[in-house]
Image (spheres, coloured by chain):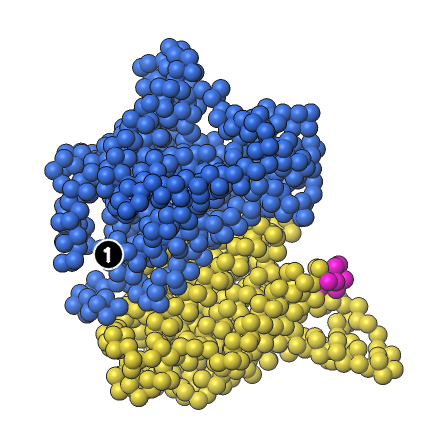
Amino acid sequence: MKQLLWFFGIATTVKLLLIPSYHSTDLEVHRHWLAITHSLPLSQWYYDETSEWTLDYPPFFAYFERFLSVFANLIDPRIVHLHHGLNYKANSAIYFQRISVIVSDLFLLYGVYISTRNLPSLKRNLVWVLLIWSPGLLIVDHLHFQYNGFLFGWLLLSISFLAQGKDLMGGFIFAVLLCFKHLFAVAAPVYFVYLLRHYCRGGLVRGFARLSAIGAVVVAVFAAAYGPFVYHGQIQQVIRHMFPFGRGLCHAYWAPNFWVFYIMLDKGIAFLLRKVGFNIPTPVASFTGGLVGDASPFAVLPRITPMTTFIMVLLALSPCLFKTWRDPRPRLIARSVAYAYTCGFLFGWHVHEKASLHISIPLALVAVESLEDAKHYFLLSIVSCYSLFPLLYEAQEYPIKVLLLLLHTILMWFCFSALFPKNIAAKGSLQDDKKSTQYESKGSSRTAAEKQRFELGWVAKSYLLGVVVVEIWGQFLHPYLLGDKLPFLPLMLISMYCAIGIVYSWIWQLKWIIIFS
Amino acid sequence: MKKVVKDKLNDGEHDDPWWWLVQKGIKSSFLCVSVFALFVRVAVGLHPYSGANTPPKFGDYEAQRHWMEITLNLPAKDWYRNSSVNNLSYWGLDYPPLTAYQSYIHGVFLKTFDPDSVALFSSRGYESYLGKLLMRWTVLSSDVLIFFPAVLYFVLVYRSMRLGMGQNSDVAWHIAMILLNPCLILIDHGHFQYNCISLGLTLAAIAAALSQKDLVASVLYCLALNHKQMSAYFAPAFFSYLLGKCLKNKNPVLEVAKLGLIVVGTFAVVWWPYLHSKEAALAVLSRLAPFERGIYEDYVANFWCTSSVLVKWKKLYTTQSLRTLSLAATLLTCLPSMVQQVLAPSSKGFLYALLNSSFSFYLFSFQVHEKSVLLPLLPLTLLALEERQSLLWLTHFAMFSMFPLLHRDKLVLAYIALYALFILVYFAPGGPCGRCNSSKTRDHSQTTKRGMEFISSIAFHPLVMGFLGLCSLILHVIYLTMRPPNKYPFLFEAVIMLICFSQFVLFTLYFNSKQWMLSKHLTSKDKQKKII
């Protein structure tokens, strides 16, 4: 515990140092929400249109902002002023909001503590390194500005409760989490099936009793969150704000998912057909914009609607749901949840690149379980962090993000090499250590002595080298060789390249779920 | 490794939590720590620099930028000369030629990406987003190219000499202590200076001297001296250590002559553009010694400034006599440590001598700045494994003594964060100071001998430490929140100075006596070490 606090302390000092760095408009968004929740009665929260940044998170998050706004008001009343506070950029506002994120990370600390309590000491250390010093969380929360660390604390807590067999508690926390940020709902089918099969079993009567128990808990949580708005008859308005389907298939910067390939395929076919002589009109609508009338952003391929993406996600998720249905095991819940988020990330509608954290954070819990996991996580974590690079596009933060990723890679490399030492037979000492720190059976590690070493195959190595090439191209060669031409190319390359990694991770996870579980 | 693991098995709970990080050896732990240290430096670089948005004179940042402007646009012979294009009263170049060359190189770098920032005349007070970044990156690159390799070199030498005992994780801790020294990071990457270059060269010289490469050491030290004249703080130690070693040689005159030749040669190369006439060389020299600025500036925790509360030195004596007085005082105070090294040069003694001579200079020499406390801190961090408590305590007071300066630079947030980071790393669980206390006290009692017992019992007494720690915490808060009475606008600075000065003096005495104890107990200690 002392050590965990130490890790967290180091992270906190780094976060403090990063306070003056670049922040996205999300800082203003959250500041405005502080103002909305502080200055207006609850009945107007979801109606306010003073700024374009309307409240579009579920009610618990709004309550959380209301709670924070009490302190903000004490520090500088202008932060929470609905009109004077607009685009308020004083140090008091920035410091207050940054520090509120840093403090709210205590939830992450608690979540990590609970979920790693029962691990052997070495593995625990490694998971702490992966979670507490996660470069992705640092980039998104403490540079870009959001409250993800706080939310992931809840997610980890929920997963670890499920893994410990405390199903009701896990379900309760997940319901709370959903009322903080609905993006987490992608894993809801997994939770539903798991709880139904694992918690509500043991005969008809007992199963039904438990089903009603968990149902009551979930309904209670949702009632606490949405009740006041139902009372005011605003539930439709709340839902409309929370799910802005008017937005496009992709975010302004394309998240590295399946649709990147789809779009590229469309462009490629259109280009070829035009070469051959067909008259293909250039589409008017853009992928990132909303649905403009009947115009399709695609030239050749059928257009994608939110419904299509929804069905695709469910389809991709179905093997995992099926497995969970047949054999709901607490040990596998972290993997299933991560897999659900992977599906949501790959096939979802208007996916944001930040959502790749949903994959890498829960998977960190199982990354230390086996060599295969470690190898997969090594790759996934680098890709997911690298895909966040375009968030910080200013020169000042460039060395920061590169060094963060580099440090993370080095630490992971050391972690995993220590966990899966080079040649076990030759180094008796490390074998001893393995015995003392790992629960794995001695026999299997003996026989698999040669296979147990952590190293990457040539495919993985060249893929990671490709990341460096893509980065050098986008940062240096592209501006130098092409100047201002094709300005979207570097970003597109990053999306495409990371998408390959994420698709690999998806297939790997799918394979794991089908074969190993 | 095997031993560590054995310990681990016996200990059960209290094992080395860092072995996964350090198991690959010194170089890879150095890689890890240095990437983190670099990251911290970049992050500190986000904060303001000295004199940001404060015309007309701005601060050190503008001085460095101005030097780049001058060296880039004027021929070398005009760099130190007052002329129509080089107004020396506006941040005239007053560092030795190596700084000028470094400014030239960095000027070329700036010109490539942002020509406006180094244009002659028009760039005065130039401040921009890109300009700040480029300037920050020049410091970062100097740090990475000079200070970091020097640290690696030193640690490898130090380790190979088995001066520091202990496990791999202790080495990693030692590296972190040198690289994450908060004062150095704040001054170089926050306030804006290039101390990393001169300190890095000095550090490399120390490592070379420890590994018996005396000629290399002299060249490196001369380069450090030619980058920043402040490096002269270490001169007595280098001089006496190298002299002592020469005297032990069969042919002392030849050895001394070789060193002398090397030193003169290095100086000649660096000063080449100014050696064509006596006037040119003297003109540069006079720029390097700004005696007109008075014996002290601001509120620095040294003897002259502190005692000026009682004795108005500036009024009583002329600058000329003060100059002699301060020189005499400085030399007198570093004499004991010099004599010790001439008589019995030893590696550990050398490190203590560096500490002692730099402290003497800090306390007694002419025109000392708050920032000069970085110089004694360097050898102290090198001795981190031996002087654990002193390291913590002195870093605290060094930081404290620079607090008013950093507060003026709006670096309070970085100050707090780096201070916390230092404390955390210092007490890293499983590190030398984070382990159970039994080993620490045993270690301490072994080295503490007779005469020092008195000093160390005062300095390290828990009550004294607690009291002073509390005082400084309260003073920090007072400084940040309260305004001093109108009659004494610098009251808080003076109090901070008094506290820091008292500690610095105490530690100078302590380190001097410790250095002398070393030679007396050298043989017995060697035996003890072997047993361990």
- The subunit carrying tag 1 is B
Asked where in the image residue A274 lies, by quadrant, the reply is bottom right
Residue B346, image x, y percentages? 26, 46
Residue depicted at 42% across the width and 51% down the height: B150
| Location of residue A103 with respect to B404 vertically, above or below | below
- Principal SS element in the magenta part? loop
| Location of residue B476 with respect to B438 vertically, above or below | above
User: Is residue A263 among the parts visible in the rendering?
Assistant: yes
Query: What shade does chain A have?
Result: yellow
The type of residue carrying mark 1 is Met
Quadrant (top left/top right/bottom left/bottom right) for the N terminus of chain A: bottom left
Secondary structure under tag 1 reads loop
Q: Is residue A460 left or right of residue B79?
A: left
**Near-viewer residue (A476 or A334):** A476
Q: Which residue is mark 1?
A: B165
The chain coloured blue is B
User: Is residue A333 among the parts visible in the rendering?
Assistant: no
Residue A43, image x, y percentages? 54, 52
Residue B425, image x, y percentages? 33, 51
Q: Which residues are magenta?
A: A481-488
Residue A428, image x, y percentages? 25, 78
Q: Is residue B426 left or right of residue B293?
A: left
Magenta span contains residue B513: no
Residue depicted at 64% across the width and 78% down the height: A308
Magenta span contains residue A484: yes
| Location of residue A268 with respect to B214 vertically, above or below | below
